[in-house]
Amino acid sequence: MSIYASVASKPVTHFAPSDWHTNNHLLASNAERLRDGSHNNRQDSSQLRNVTYNQTAWGIHDNTTRLSNRIDDIEKWRETLEKTLRDTDQEIADLEKDKDMAERALEAKALPLDVASECLTLRDGRREIDVVDDLASSELQKEVDVIEGIKAALQDKVSSAFEQLCLLREARQQLAADLRDKTEAKGIDSYCKELSIDSPDICRQPNSTRTPKGSVTPQTWEDFSRYNKDRADTEMRASQRLREAIHSTVAQTDNDLEAQRQATEFALRKRIHEMERAKDEDEWQKQNTEEEIAKQERNIRELEQAIRDKEKPLQLAMTRLENRTYRPNVELCRDNAQYGLVGEVHEIEDTIKALKNKSRMPSNNNRDALEKQLYKINQDLELKNNSLALDNKCMNVRNKLVTPPVTATQKNLATFKTDRETYTAQKLLLA
């Protein structure tokens, strides 16, 4: 079979010219329509790109501005918290210094208390009638009571200062924690602010729009920092009032103690003066009594000598009377001489009796009474000397309370002296 026969036998669809023109028109119309749709799509896409670009750019700008404003807010609070923290640190240091001052003042009261107690113990060494509840004893006991009261007041201030320091440190800790958080937040926000679309370390983050656990509102955030600041301010004001109270208490207690010290020492000096007068009176009485005893003993001796002196005249008168009894006969006359001799004997005997009575009764009794009184005076004088020695010892003990403090000049002189001695010793060693 030939090729021509195959072609001729194949069926072919034939179209009319109108169909052909219609088809061409349809192709042109569809192409025109699709091009118009594509053009509109391109226009819309371009517009959308511009709108979204501007929105994104403004969004980045707005959020960068928001971050900047947030950084400014954080920085303002950081500055406020830093100042409050510095003030709190300064207040803590001041309160610690004043607390140390109160503790030193409290420790310094140990010496006055020991001195007052020692004085009371010394005065317990008084004996018998000198154990008197005098003004000095009253002032010494009052001094002990004043010191105990001062110690209680100072201890109360020390305890209050310790408690206030704990509160200040707690407030400071809260401030420091808040400040650290704000510093860290500022660093994060500053880093976020510096980020841009050209930054190498940006990437997609999973679930970045989530609300983190523990998130708070701006008002809560500000209230938290304001609470920390207000709390620190409140504790600082309380601390300042406490420090004023500490200074007032230390000054007042020092004044009270000094006033009581002066009152006690005045009472002791007054008692010493009274005791010295009593001692002088005893010594004067002792001297006069001893002199009177000596005079009385001399009087007794003179009386005894007078009695002895009457023995010879009595013997003479008796001998004369006895001899005259041997006169003979009528010569044994009771004449005037006889009466005179008899009277002389009686007179001398009466004189001797009177002298003996004077020597035995009043004179000896007076001497014995004077010696007993002298013993009592000596006993009382011993008591007075003992009491006076104890009170003077109390005054010597109390000199510890008025020892002047070592001045800076004295310290420098002591240091210079030590350095000079060291230099001299080194020269001697080198020699």
Image (cartoon, helix red, strand yellow):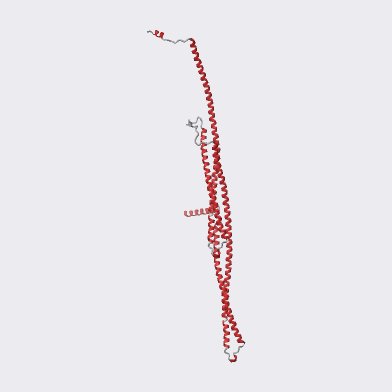
Does residue 412 appear in the picture of this structure? no
Q: Is residue 266 above or below residue 173?
A: below
In this view of the protein, which residue sits in the foreground, 173 or 287?
A: 173
Q: Residue furthest right?
A: 336
Which of the 4 image quadrants contains residue 394?
bottom right
- Residue 34, given in percent of the width and then of the height, sits at 50, 18
Q: What is the quadrant of the N terminus in the image?
A: top left
- Residue 282, given in percent of the width and then of the height, sits at 57, 67
Which of the 4 image quadrants contains residue 271?
bottom right
Q: Is residue 160 above or below residue 22?
A: below
Query: Measuring 58% from the left and 86% from the top, which residue is drawn there?
Result: 321
Query: Measuring 54% from the left and 33% from the top, which residue is drawn there?
Result: 66
Does residue 26 appear in the picture of this structure? yes
Q: Residue furthest left?
A: 1
- Residue 418, given in percent of the width and then of the height, sits at 51, 54
Marks counted in the figure total: 0
In this view of the protein, which residue sits in the foreground, 127 or 118?
A: 127
- Residue 428, given in percent of the width and then of the height, sits at 48, 55
Q: Is residue 56 above or below residue 85?
A: above
